[in-house]
Amino acid sequence: MNPYWIYLKAELGKLRDSGVAEEFLSFVPEETLTACGVARKREKFTEQFGSQASVNALIESLSDSCVLELTKFCDRWRNNGVFKKLVAADTWLEVDAPTSEILLQQAEPELAHIFQRNEFELLKIVADPELLAHEPYRSRKPGETVSFSTCLAKSSKGRCRIFDGMHRAIQLARNGCGTISLCYSEE
């Protein structure tokens, strides 16, 4: 499993939203987009990112250099430090991990107390009514589709901690999924 693809599929899958797409287009240099075959015109851009299947196909067609460049720019755009975590590990494995064993990295800073109170355990966090009173969680309902469900994690002492895909994991757990697909490396 290519962890760079997973990251890009999740991040670029958000570009179906026109506001997110405009922000992304204003952040990434035109020459990078052109070199990677990413459209700048709205009609073509919408076609490339209109569905998760089209996003996946685009990413899987990219050269290794484009994958790395887009990963760097997505990391800067999202300001999430994922690129550094991806390059730090040589080996990535895939597992369907039980939700009861998954830990989360801190998501929204203003909700840090909720994550800490629940010891960063996914199922405890999902069951905390205070979390569901805040955005982005309150605007999502149980059962809503997660278009790209694989998350990135680090494993330590037999437990995986998700560092990219916390919102996806929370929604999947709210949807009643007993396992979540993880691409992980050892810490």
Image (tube, helix red, strand yellow):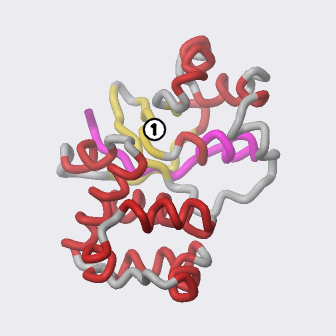
Quadrant in which the N terminus is drawn:
bottom left
Of residues 129 and 76, which is closer to you in this image? 76
Residue 35 in the image, given as x and y percentages of width and height: 25, 81
Dot 1 falls on a residue whose secondary structure is: strand
Which residues fall within the magenta stretch? 169-187
Residue drawn at x 65%, y 25% is 125
The amino acid sitting under disc 1 is: Ile
Residue 147 in the image, given as x and y percentages of width and height: 63, 63
Residue 103 at least partly seen? no
Judge whether residue 105 is colored magenta: no
Left/right placement of residue 26 relative to residue 88 reads right
- As displayed, is residue 124 above or below residue 136? above
Residue 118 in the image, given as x and y percentages of width and height: 61, 16
Of residues 89 and 51, which is closer to you in this image? 51
Residue 41 at least partly seen? yes
Give the labeled residue for mark 1: 162
Residue drawn at x 43%, y 30% is 159
Judge whether residue 181 is colored magenta: yes
Residue drawn at x 81%, y 45% is 142
Name the quadrant containing residue 61.
bottom left
Quadrant in which the C terminus is drawn:
top left
Of residues 138 and 17, which is closer to you in this image? 17
Residue drawn at x 80%, y 52% is 143
Using a 10 Å C-alpha cutoff, classify the residue at mark 1 as few (fewer than 14 neighbours), some (14 to 19) or many (20 or more). Answer: many
- As displayed, is residue 21 above or below residue 174? below
Left/right placement of residue 174 relative to residue 75 reads right
